[in-house]
Image (tube, helix red, strand yellow):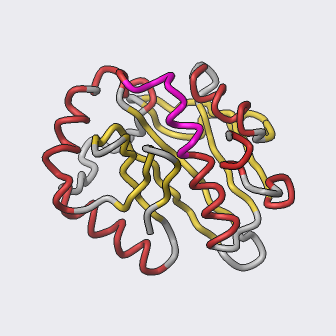
């Protein structure tokens, strides 16, 4: 399912995106390196792009996660992922994203996070959405502040990032706090 606002669109990641996705990642490698998850295991399995897309498609079919390409017009500029979709008594998901350096600071990510959060609440019927951000990532901290996500504190050594265990600040929002939807707040 595509999610859109104006010329900003989230659409499912596809196998045919490989060349554009690879080029975007290579062009932005230095920009993304300080924020990218890594594995502490030296010989960790790294899936091919096709394996990654297939695993994301399986997760979407099971309702466990959704990988989206961020597009402005017809141009791929990043990715947003809804992961760790948990049902039962939790009814929660986590959102993560990255955007090309030349597109950062243009208000694209807040729109995408708003669209994805609204999808989680009003399409998937979830109760809570969480975003975890490195404390020094000022741009992402502005995104959650703009959208009204609540700061829930620091998770010490939460994720392995760029070769080391890194602290993250955890932000969350519940459906009760998002009445009317986040996308509507940005208009």
Compared across the picture, whether 157 is left or right of 25 comes to right
Which quadrant of the figure has residue 90? bottom right
Segment colored magenta: 103-112
* Rendered view: 163 above or below 158: above
- Estimate the x, y position of residue 52 in percent, counting from the top left: 27, 60
Outermost residue to the left: 19
At 47% from the left and 37% from the top, the residue drawn is 160
Q: Nearer the viewer, residue 5 or 105?
A: 5
Q: Position of residue 100 (x, y in %)?
A: 35, 29
Count of all numbered marks drawn on residues in the image? 0
Describe residue 45's horizontal placement relative to residue 59 as left or right: left
The N terminus, quarter of image: bottom left
Residue 109 sits inside the magenta stretch:
yes
In the image, what residue occupies the spot 69% across and 55% down?
Answer: 129
Instruction: Please identify the quarter of the rendering in which residue 79 is found.
Output: top left
What residue appears at the point 36 percent right and 75 percent down from the top-left corner?
58
In this view of the protein, which residue sits in the foreground, 11 or 187? 187
For the point 78% across and 76% down, which residue is it?
A: 89
Residue 126, position as x, y percentages in the image? 70, 69
Find out whether residue 23 is within the magenta segment.
Answer: no
**Can you say which quadrant of the picture contains the C terminus?**
top right
Q: Is residue 185 left or right of residue 44?
A: right
Eyeballing the image, is 149 above or below 28?
A: below
The prevailing secondary structure element of the residues shown in magenta is: helix
Question: Residue 125: percent from the left, percent from the top?
Answer: 70, 73
């Amino acid at each position: 399912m595509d999610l859109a606002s104006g010329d900003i669109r989230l659409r499912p990641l596809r196998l045919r995106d490989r060349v554009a996705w690879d080029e975007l990642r290579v062009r932005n490698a230095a920009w993304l390196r300080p924020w990218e998850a890594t594995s502490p295991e030296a010989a960790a399995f790294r899936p091919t792009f096709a394996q990654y897309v297939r695993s994301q498609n399986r997760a979407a079919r099971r309702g466990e996660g959704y990988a989206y390409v961020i597009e402005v017009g017809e141009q791929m500029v990043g990715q947003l992922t809804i992961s760790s979709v948990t049902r039962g008594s939790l009814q929660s998901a986590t959102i993560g994203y990255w955007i090309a350096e030349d597109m950062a600071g243009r208000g694209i990510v807040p729109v995408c996070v708003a669209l994805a959060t609204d999808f989680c609440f009003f399409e998937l019927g979830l109760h809570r959405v969480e975003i975890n951000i490195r404390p020094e990532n000022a741009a992402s901290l502005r995104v959650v502040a703009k959208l009204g996500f609540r700061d829930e504190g620091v998770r010490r050594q939460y994720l392995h990032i760029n070769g080391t265990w890194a602290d993250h600040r955890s932000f969350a929002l519940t459906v009760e706090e998002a009445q009317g939807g986040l996308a509507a707040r940005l208009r």
